[in-house]
Image (cartoon, rainbow, N blue to C red):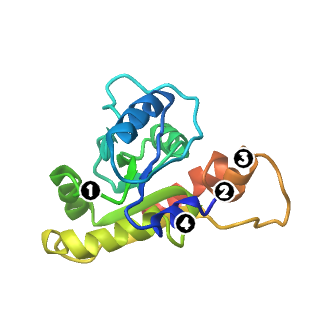
Amino acid sequence: MLEDLALMRSVQNMKLFIPTYLDDVEEAVEQMTVDPSPNYLRLNSSIKRENGIESFGHYRRVRLGSQAVLIGTGPVMHHFISANDQLNLKLDIWLCDQLPLATMPIQLVESINHTKHILIAEEHFEAGGLGEAITVHLHKNHLQQVSGPVTFHYFNIKGYLSGNYGDQKWHLEENMLAGSSLLHELEKAIKN
């Protein structure tokens, strides 16, 4: 389901937990069991967390870079991290594990202020997803901390572009969220 975040965000007081790694699931469930709000858990990963990456939280930096800031959610981020490493892009990569958004870490705001370029990645349609939440959150809470214009580039699901159907990996590639199409789109986004 590619509209689930938008649907769940529309429910009053709903908290969304979006694990990126297999190890995150247990940590997310532990947080959910003590949270009095209604909760939604989005599952979709079997990849173990790399050494040195923080436990499941609100925001986690997984790569330090200076070329652009990439904020994303969920297992689709594995493809972006891999593409960053493969192309040596030097992206400052942050995972966003929960919605609604918490206050951004000062390091993330400083990185946005430095690069003036934000890439947002999610396996979701643009409407109601992370990109929309990040954009609104920045304007409402951090605009005074960021000087000058900031460029945004959204990587998200666009639909069934070819009119064909396939497995998840095929759809990610068709929507430029994995494979060679992602590599091409990332390079293009960095140049703009």
Given residues 29 and 181, the one toward you in this image is 29
Label 1 environment density (alpha carbons within 10 Å; few <14, some 14–19, many ≥20): few
Q: How far apart are marks 3 and 2 (CA)?
A: 11 Å
Q: Do the residues labelled 4 and 1 touch (CB within 8 Å)?
A: no
Helix, strand or loop at mark 1: loop
Helix, strand or loop at mark 3: helix
Picture coordinates of residue 179, whole percent (x, y): 65, 45
Q: Distance between the residues labelled 1 and 3?
A: 30 Å
Task: Residue at 28%, 51% (x, y): give it.
Answer: 66
Given residues 81 and 46, the one toward you in this image is 46
Q: Name the residue under label 2.
A: 1
Residue type, label 4: Leu
Q: Name the residue under label 1.
A: 102
Residue type, label 2: Met
Disc ID at residue 7: 4
Q: How far apart are marks 2 and 4 (CA)?
A: 10 Å
Residue type, label 3: Gln
Residue type, label 1: Ala
Q: Distance between the residues labelled 3 and 4?
A: 21 Å
Residue 119 is left or right of residue 125, and the answer is left
Q: Name the residue under label 3.
A: 168
Looking at marks 1 and 2 on the same chain, the residue that comes earlier in the sequence is marked by 2
